[in-house]
Image (cartoon, coloured by chain):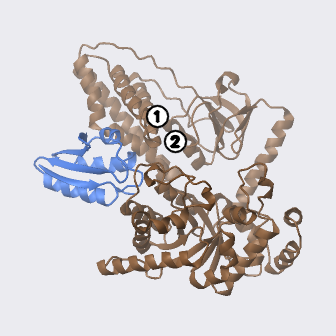
Chain colours: A blue, B brown
Amino acid sequence: MVRRELIIKNISGLHLRPTGILCNEAIKYRSEIRFEKDGSFTNVKSVLSVLGACIKCGDRVELICQGPDEEDAMNALTALIESGLGE
Amino acid sequence: MFKGVNASSGIGIGKAVIVEETELVIQRETVADSVAEVERFKSALEQTMQETEAMAADLAQRIGEKEAEIMNGHLMLLMDPMLTGEVETSISSEQICGEYAIEQVFTMYAGVFAAMDDELMQQRATDMLDLKTRLQKTMMGVASANIADLPAGTILVARDLTPSMTAGINPEHVTGIVTELGGKTSHSAILARALEIPAVVAVGGFLDNVKNGDEIVLDGSTGAVYVNPDASVADEYRQKREAFLKEKKELEQYIGKPTVTKDGVSVELVANIGRPEDVEKVLQYDGEGVGLFRTEFLFMDRNAMPTEEEQFEAYKTVAEMLEGKPVIIRTLDIGGDKEIPYMGLAKDENPFLGYRAIRLCLDRKEDIYRPQLRALLRASAYGKIRIMIPMVTCIDELREAKALIAEIKGELDGLGVAYDKDIQVGVMMETAAASLVADLFAKEADFFSIGTNDLTQYTMAVDRGNDKVSYLYSTFNPAVLRSIRHIIACGRAEGIMVGMCGEAASDPMMIPLLLAFGLNEFSMSASAILKSRKMITGYSMEELQAVAEKAMSFATAGEVEAYMKEFVG
């Protein structure tokens, strides 16, 4: 299992469009991919789950990947989040 | 007459077509073969996804990528394994029909979104309900209301327009939209504006007062709606409609044209914005840049100071979206009249004369000003950013801010971080004190931007919110006009750019005077740009010099205003 702390940079937070971009990438991996924020977990492969977490700009989240391709998933998703998810 | 919310401007005249969604009756029915039921759901899902994809492609082609995003968002929700998985699980575990499983799951999520404390998220509830109905209709073989084939001259009347319904509208046939529900920022209002269809939304009880074929007149600028109006009202609106279309067409000719007077003096026409997304409108109306980007939005409605990183992203976004056109970004202009709990500002007895704007920022360099300036400098590597300092009254403030900027530049150099080494630092001219020493400011600032709203307030010593004295609040007061003329002359004498970002910059009666005074840049709401360009290109400086001279010879605001009114006609 790998985990990394990230800061969400999108101005409007994780709303529908950036979340869609994020989930589309996440589903490419076989690993289980989650966000942990304030002790609760979010399934990063689900648009609804991520939207429901109401993650705002500037929020700190921990990205957790667990599975056969966890390193690849971590690297790809970190890069995507750092790039601002298309915003 | 009915009154609603003006959602998309223009006059719509035509015959009512009421679009009603068939009321679906969804009942909990048990199924014997839940495996087959899951398959039935999956094929409905597949079909709905294909339709959504087609709608997105159609919107992207007809209107633009941005509008298509609403449908792309729907597609992402339909692809969500959590959502569809939950429907499948409930079909098989409870042995219920797909329609009912959809009802349960989607209604639950719509409720979750509706309860969220965030407007963007609350809108997702509408999306969930729209998708729910579409999936159920597909499963039941009920056709959706067909909006694509409405006859020409239709006024579309509905309780509410779902995003998927609005996406199918043909703007050549639909001349107006009236709905009982919705708001200015709902998807359907946004799409109506993108399609340039006049629309009035949130007209309470409208469906009880209209039937198919009724003559409807609506004014999307005022929110007025008439059902079977008198011939005189209908005629009046027909004329208004023609005037509106004529003006729109005329103004469109000014897109891409330079802003230059008949005798060859060119000025810049730029826009005021409050958020990064406003840039789109600036480009749409052919603004030549942004003359005022207010940064307060970054600090409002939140619980902690925005980080440097967050600010950097916002400034960079705007700079990049403008593709090389200049943007003047005003540093934080806030004081004790705004409730920002996390800043811990004491309530000012007299906030407009108190601890605010540059005074506050220079006092709190470490937690407020340094991060903002650093973010601005870093973002300047991505476009043409200019920094503007608000509410200066004495040179010391400009010097202190510039010293801090120089210090941060040194830090960035040390770290090898890119920024625009020639970034301009200007001041907002909005106090009587700054105006009186404008010649001194002009020697040390890279540009001026005159904020007429505050300049008028501080010059006339008048609170425009106070009804008893608001009659004094007029930019046409000789005192204010002399101040403006003086500021422009001082700036021009030192060869710096002088702009204006107050309401006066787009006032048709002020524009001739400002041109004559020598103003270089006019910053206004994006929608006023083309109208102003049309005006400016119609004047010659020679003619305006004489007008300004005459206007400045009057002793009262009333006389100046009357004279300018007559001149503009």
Q: Secondary structure at mark 2?
A: helix
Q: Chain of mark 2?
A: B
Q: Residue at x 73, y 50 (%)?
A: B466
Tag shown at residue B267: none
In this rendering, position of residue B439 left or right of residue B310: right
Residue hosting label 1:
B126
Local crowd at mark 2 within 10 Å, few (<14), some, or many (≥20)? many
Q: Against B424, is B305 above or below?
A: above
Q: Is residue B500 visible?
A: yes
Q: Is residue B238 left or right of residue A81?
A: right
- Tag 1's secondary structure? helix
Please name whichever residue, B21 or B148, is drawn nearer the observer in this view of the structure: B21
Q: Amino acid at mark 1?
A: Thr
Where is residue B35 drawn, in percent x and y?
22, 22
Chain letter of disc 1 in the image: B
Query: Residue under circle 2?
Result: B187
> What's the distance in space between the residues labelled 2 and 1, CA to CA?
9 Å
Looking at the image, residue B229 sits to the left or right of residue B168; the answer is right
Residue B381: where, in percent of width, then height? 41, 74
Callout 2 touching callout 1 (CB < 8 Å): yes
The image shows residue B468, relative to residue B291, as above or below, that is: above
